[in-house]
């Protein structure tokens, strides 16, 4: 093979089979994006704040999965029943112990507190875990499955179905349970919620906890095909924030569809424009949607 | 007189450093409709919210059904059976009519939920037709019905209605006051906060008039109506 054939991507890049594989890969990544965005949109919808600590919390969860694997030999998927409750408890405690206390009920304070938390967590990670990028090896890291000719990595398939299942559970909890009803009530009418006897502070903390629990699940699905370092959350939180705005602030359906959309745009964009330019597609879509639907794809008009 | 249900003594409250209630006294006996009148900004809603635990009392005492509930948390006050239907309805706009009603029984009235739902449907057949509709899409009158229905789901011992007739058509206001009378005849004690003075005094057993955070008149509706000076001074009639 001549070297100049490598430098210029041949037209075979637009081969339908490659495009198909790229879309599938985008969907698998998109499912995890959606899960991360769901946590963010839940917290936004209920507390009316952007949780700036979302990326840092994901980073901590990834370290959690990493150390459970390295120190206890636990497979990342086996760590699910540990990481999900652990992140939930951490979120609940963080809200009640720090955010609610320090904010004195002012939304703009909560914003700054989560920003401060994210800086603290990132620096703590740098101090304790150093800036090295860490990965884990599992038996299935490099295995693939054949889906109509496209070779998809097994961890990505697991992530896809796992993220979808987690999303389904979340939607069920929010849509059908008494807690979910209380969460939705507090999201739009705090005073009314207090008057029917809902413990609003408890519901806020539950929402924060559930938002972080989503990250616990996402971390378990991500790590086998990904890596962790102290900055790993930043890229995700930027994408998750884009998805939340794109889908409509506080909209679950929007976060889900937006997650898939961004995943596919990123993947196909990377295929056509190269890895580094691929993310441009995300922001092009973002700007176009906001131009024509400022409330996002599924957001209610203000 | 029947046993005292609510006893408020020297209640003071406000927002931050601003004091709104300046030592308020008020009683309600079991089975009464008591009207609380007063111009806009007199502090009626602040009083209601202090009773409900949303605004913190800075002084005085509130006794309800034998318990002291001064500075209790809103949920403890709901548990005790003091239920407020707030000004502006405050229904959950993103929840269905049925979910709104079910949340009325979030802490109280769980055992009787099914029977209470039936009762609310028979009082407000309109709600039954709209069970799956989001509350935010209801008309103002329907939202008021829903807010009252939600309050009834908690099996209140005392129901506070804060300006329930606000924004309703004259026909709906008529129906609303008839309903308040019916609920009371079935045994419900009611604190009716209104700017609609005429109709309120017609159905109330006793009345209070509030001005700048204190009670300036208390007595029978007839006394208030018979005194042109009082009517002009406090009610702008
Ligand atoms: N949340 C609040 N924060 C600060 N001041 C308030 C608040 N709610 C009401 N007030 C003030 O308290 C006073 C009494 O208001 P309110 O209790 O609503 O009166 P009413 O219900 O009799 O119209 C008004 O001067 C009002 O501006
Ligand atoms: Mg008022």
Image (cartoon, helix red, strand yellow):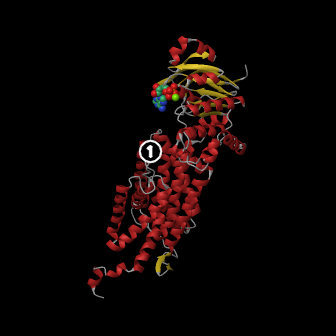
Nearest the eye: A157 or B87: B87
Residue at the left extreme of this rendering: A4
Figure disc tally: 1
Position of residue A87 measured from the top left corner of the image (x, y, whole percent)? 53, 56
Give whichever of A34, A51 is nearer the camera.
A34
**Image position of B37 with respect to B77: above or below:** above
| Above or below, comparing residue B27 to residue A28 in the picture | above
Q: Is residue B86 left or right of residue A3?
A: right
Q: Name the secondary structure under disc 1.
A: helix
Looking at the image, can residue B60 be seen? Answer: no
Return the residue at label 1.
Answer: A110
Say above or below: B214 vs B153: above
Of residue B116 and residue B103, the one placed in the foreground of this image is: B116
Q: Position of residue A76 (x, y in %)?
A: 53, 67
Query: What is the quadrant of the N terminus of chain B in the image?
Result: top right
Q: Does the closest atom of ligand 1 sit within 8 Å of the Cβ of label 1?
A: no
């Amino acid at each position: 093979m001549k070297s100049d054939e490598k430098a210029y991507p041949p037209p075979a890049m637009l081969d339908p089979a490659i495009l198909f594989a790229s879309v599938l890969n985008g969907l698998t990544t998109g499912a995890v994006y959606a899960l991360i965005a769901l946590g963010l949109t839940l917290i936004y919808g209920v507390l009316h704040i952007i949780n700036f600590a979302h990326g840092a919390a994901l980073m901590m969860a990834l370290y959690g999965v990493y150390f459970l694997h390295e120190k206890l030999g636990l497979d990342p998927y086996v760590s699910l029943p540990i990481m999900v409750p652990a992140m939930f408890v951490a979120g609940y405690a963080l809200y009640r112990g720090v955010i609610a206390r320090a904010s004195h009920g002012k939304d703009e304070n909560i914003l700054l507190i989560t920003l401060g938390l994210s800086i603290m967590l990132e620096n703590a990670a740098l101090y304790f875990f150093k800036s090295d990028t860490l990965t884990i090896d599992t038996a299935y890291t490099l295995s693939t499955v054949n889906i109509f000719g496209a070779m998809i990595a097994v961890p990505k398939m697991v992530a896809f179905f796992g993220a979808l299942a987690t999303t389904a559970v979340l939607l069920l909890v929010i849509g059908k349970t008494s807690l979910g009803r209380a969460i939705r009530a507090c999201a739009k009418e705090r005073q009314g919620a207090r008057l029917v006897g809902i413990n609003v502070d408890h519901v806020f903390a539950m929402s924060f906890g559930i938002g972080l629990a989503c990250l616990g699940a996402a971390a378990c699905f991500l790590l086998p095909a990904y890596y962790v370092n102290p900055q790993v959350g930043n890229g995700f939180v930027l994408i998750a924030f884009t998805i939340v705005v794109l889908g409509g602030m506080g909209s679950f359906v929007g976060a889900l569809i937006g997650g898939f959309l961004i995943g596919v745009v990123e993947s196909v964009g990377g295929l056509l424009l190269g890895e580094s330019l691929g993310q441009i597609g995300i922001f092009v879509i973002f700007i176009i949607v906001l131009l024509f639907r400022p409330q996002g794809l599924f957001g209610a008009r203000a | 007189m029947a046993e005292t249900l609510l006893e408020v003594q020297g209640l003071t409250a406000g927002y931050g450093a601003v004091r709104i209630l300046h030592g308020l006294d008020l009683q309600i006996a079991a089975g009464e409709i008591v009207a609380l009148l007063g111009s806009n900004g007199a502090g009626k809603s602040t009083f209601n919210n202090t009773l409900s635990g949303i605004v913190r009392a800075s002084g005085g005492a509130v006794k309800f059904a034998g318990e002291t509930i001064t500075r209790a948390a809103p949920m403890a006050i709901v548990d005790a059976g003091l239920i407020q239907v707030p000004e502006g309805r405050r229904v959950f706009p993103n929840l269905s009519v049925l979910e709104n009603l079910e949340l009325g029984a979030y802490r109280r009235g769980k055992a009787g939920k099914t029977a209470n739902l039936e009762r609310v449907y028979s009082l407000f057949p309109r709600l039954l037709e709209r069970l799956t509709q989001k509350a935010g899409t209801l008309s103002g009158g329907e939202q008021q019905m829903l807010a009252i229905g939600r309050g009834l789901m908690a099996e209140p011992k005392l129901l506070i209605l804060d300006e329930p007739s606000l924004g309703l058509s004259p026909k709906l206001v008529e129906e609303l006051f008839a309903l308040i009378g019916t609920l009371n005849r079935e045994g419900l004690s009611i604190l009716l906060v209104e700017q609609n003075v005429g109709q309120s005094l017609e159905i109330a057993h006793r009345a209070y008039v509030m001005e700048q955070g204190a009670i300036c008149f208390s007595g029978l509706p007839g006394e208030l109506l018979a005194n042109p000076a009082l009517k002009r001074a406090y009610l702008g009639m």
